[in-house]
Image: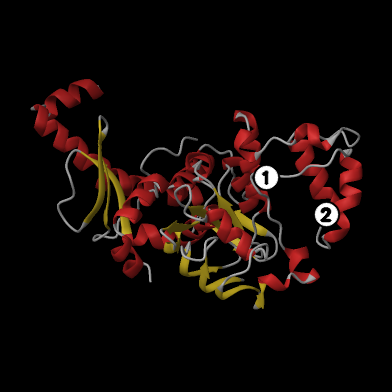
Amino acid sequence: MIQLNNVEFGYDKNRKLFNGVNWQLEPGHLYGLLGRNGAGKTTLLKIMTGLLFPQAGDALIDGEPAHKRTAQQLSDIYFLQEEIYVPHLKIKQFEEAFAPFYPHFSHEQFVEYLTKMEMDNMLGFIDKFSHATNGLDIPTKSIFRKIMAAYADEQKTVIISTHQVRDLHSLIDAVSILDNGRMILNAPGDVITDKLLFDVDDQKAQAGKLYYSEETPRGIYQVKENVNHIDSALDLELLFNAAVQNKQEFTELFK
Amino acid sequence: MDFKSTQTIYRQIENWVFEQILSGAWKPGERAKSVRELAVAFEVNPNTVMRSYERLQNQEIITNKRGIGFFVNEDAPEKIHAIRKKEFMEEEVPEFLKNMRLLGITMEEIMAVSN
């Protein structure tokens, strides 16, 4: 389990980016970490993986401070950043150089994923294929989702920090929203749809509180209080907009 | 499958399984596709498929045989028929009748079309 308790951090001494962030991540979920540019998503991930140290509070991986960076911790986590360094190596050489750091590494899975990505020539150079995740073309996006669906299980915690929510909404089953140095929402998808109703209608909600609405030619898209416990499909974009407009209420609602 | 409709993904997968069984693609007594297989095919989180499968279990459409996987129950087609009929009567018929009233359509006109 990954846990952040009252984490404080700022690149500038006089301006805190995080003023007590609490975040708990349970295995078995694929979290979507959402936040505006500059909200600190990458910084938070760097703190979690021991690349930056909290100035106050704790960042714990299975109960141990992340900044200790023990071999055990590092062999259990992988942080794929936006910009990654890919050495000029053949895929086979790359595997030989990096696999020993990860005791859970599976050659079979590696080959399977490479095959799916159509880059299974083990003698090809890996840096030729280093498309950043944002640059995935249409067929590769689908392959990426299939790989993630096959990869996720009850022992793994996956966090994806992205603005491309439409590409990933069917995979994300827990949502964390970072805003203004605070985690204003952190909940599994089924808890969210139990409390909130995502709807498109000709008119605004009559019963219950209306948290967010957006008028479109197809009707009024809205996020409202789920008074009648109706099941609706979670819309990540609407959720994000509703959350940043109702920080206080949402913090209470999802305590 | 397009997940843009307002129906939840797990309900859409549940309906898809209903169709597989009604069409005979999944036969009674046979093994159902694994949670992971469906997750990969639909590109969704395995937890979402699990939720569909839990609902299907509660409706006695499929059974979980520990360690082996999920199996289609012998009477699954009849059960689905009953569930579908109930949904039709409770959801689609009232909507249909509402539209009939709205447009001033009589039962006789409907009968003429159905014949």
- The residue identified by callout 2 is A106
Residue A50 percent location from the top left of the image = 67, 66
Question: Is A172 situated above or below B67?
Answer: above
In this view, the residue farthest toward the front is: A14
- The residue identified by callout 1 is A147
Q: Residue at x 19, y 38 (%)?
A: A202
In this view, the residue farthest toward the left is: B104
Question: Is A191 situated above or below A143?
Answer: below
Q: Chain of mark 1?
A: A
> A63 or B30: which is nearer to us?
A63
Q: Chain of mark 2?
A: A
Residue B89 percent location from the top left of the image = 26, 45
Q: Is residue A40 left or right of residue B85?
A: right
> Looking at the picture, do discs 1 and 2 lie on one chain?
yes
Query: Callout 1, which amino acid?
Result: Ile
Residue A14 percent location from the top left of the image = 47, 65
Q: Is residue B90 left or right of residue B47?
A: left
Q: Residue at x 43, y 48 (%)?
A: B11
Quadrant where the N terminus of chain A sits is bottom right
Occupied quadrant, residue B104: top left
**How many discs mark residues in the rendered view?**
2
Q: Residues within 10 Å of mark 1 (few under 14, many from 20)?
A: some
Query: Callout 2, which amino acid?
Result: Ser
Occupied quadrant, residue B108: top left
Question: Is A6 situated above or below A193?
Answer: below
Calculate the distance from the C-alpha at mark 1 to the C-alpha at mark 2.
14 Å
Residue A40 percent location from the top left of the image = 51, 56
Residues tagged 1 and 2 counted as in contact (Cβ below 8 A): no
Question: Mark 2: which secondary structure?
Answer: loop
Q: Residue at x 14, y 31 (%)?
A: B100
> A103 or B107: which is nearer to us?
A103
> A243 or A216: which is nearer to us?
A243
